[in-house]
Image (cartoon, rainbow, N blue to C red):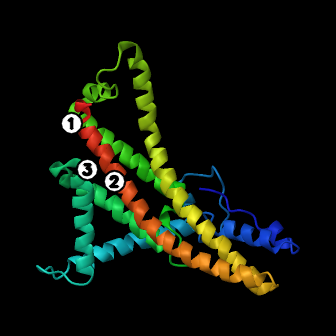
Amino acid sequence: MSAPVPIAAAEGAAADPLTAAIAKLSHELSVLPLNGEKVTVGGSFAPSAFALTNYTFWLIVAVLLVAAFFVIGSRRASLVPKGIGNIAEAGVEFVRNSICIDVMGPEGAKFFPFIGTIFFFVLFNNLLGNIPPALPGTGTVGTTFTWGVIVFLVYNGIGIRKNGAWGYLKSFIPSGTPLALKPLMFVLEIMSHLLRPLTLGVRLFANMYAGHIMLGVFAIFCALVLEHFTAIGLIVLPLSFVMQVILRGFELFVAVLQAYIFAILTAVYINGALHASEH
């Protein structure tokens, strides 16, 4: 959990309102407890020390929305679903057919519950974060890295179960590798696998957090121009507003894209573990 960015000094710098506004934006995008207590880095991990943060709150809201979406979508099942049921069915078929089965073949269908959970969790958190004043639950590295670790443990567990521990480890050395290069290839493959949780988590976090930074910066430009209007503001204001609209649409695209990337990479990793003996 990261400490809130202090803003008192920046707010006191009246001569530089842009610096103060950016400091306030950084503060608002920090992980902040809802009870107003100060967050300390490396504090107690006792259950009594738990604090509901702004990101955790919206993460819970997103999970409840996912549950409500599928509960409502599954009611009154019919041959021709309507409304939310139609959207839910289309989403399920997309993940099952276009991700699980396309990547892993027919056996990929049995992994749909896991991959589908990841896809819709990430998707709803990403989309909710685009509705002010909500924040994306995927906007903290703690959430995204945790999912990366879960994926790492699951696909390696599948690989060991399918091929045996020794058979799975042997797959880290591609067939046909010269004997002298086998130790090096094994070490490189181990490092590659260990980095996967990090790359999964950082990719998702960086895209969601950076998008909100950009939206906030152009919102600051709009606010400063309206507060301190000058001749150059006639150019800055419309350009900042147009960028807000463009970035908002781009963020919606990125929200869906990142959910798809996270899910399809999970399917690729599971497929690789299933067929490790063929490498």
Mark 3, Cα crowd under 10 Å, few <14 / some 14-19 / many 20+, is many
Residue 130: where, in percent of width, then height?
50, 74
Residue furthest top as drawn: 180
Tag shown at residue 236: none
**At numbered mark 2, what does the secondary structure look like: helix, strand or loop?**
helix
Q: Earlier in the sequence, mark 1 or mark 3?
A: 3
Relative depth, front residue between 277 and 77: 277
> So how many labels did they put on this image?
3
Amino acid bearing label 1: Lys
Instruction: Tell me the residue that label 2 is attached to.
Output: 264
Mark 2, Cα crowd under 10 Å, few <14 / some 14-19 / many 20+, is many
Q: Which mark is nearer the camera, 2 or 1?
A: 2
Q: Earlier in the sequence, mark 2 or mark 1?
A: 1
Evaluate if marks 1 and 3 touch, with contact meaning CB atoms under 8 Å apart: no
The structure residue drawn at horizontal position 44% and vertical position 72%, both measured from the top left corner, is: 127
Instruction: Tell me the residue that label 1 is attached to.
Output: 162
Residue 82: where, in percent of width, then height?
21, 84
Spatial CA distance of label 1 from label 3 is 18 Å
Residue 221: where, in percent of width, then height?
71, 76
Instruction: Tell me the residue that label 3 is attached to.
Output: 103
Evaluate if marks 2 and 3 touch, with contact meaning CB atoms under 8 Å apart: yes
Q: Quadrant of the C terminus?
A: top left
Judged left or right of residue 186, residue 92 is left
Q: Quadrant of the N terminus?
A: bottom right
Residue 71: where, in percent of width, then height?
26, 76
Judged left or right of residue 172, residue 37 is right
Mark 1, Cα crowd under 10 Å, few <14 / some 14-19 / many 20+, is some
Q: Is residue 36 visible?
A: no
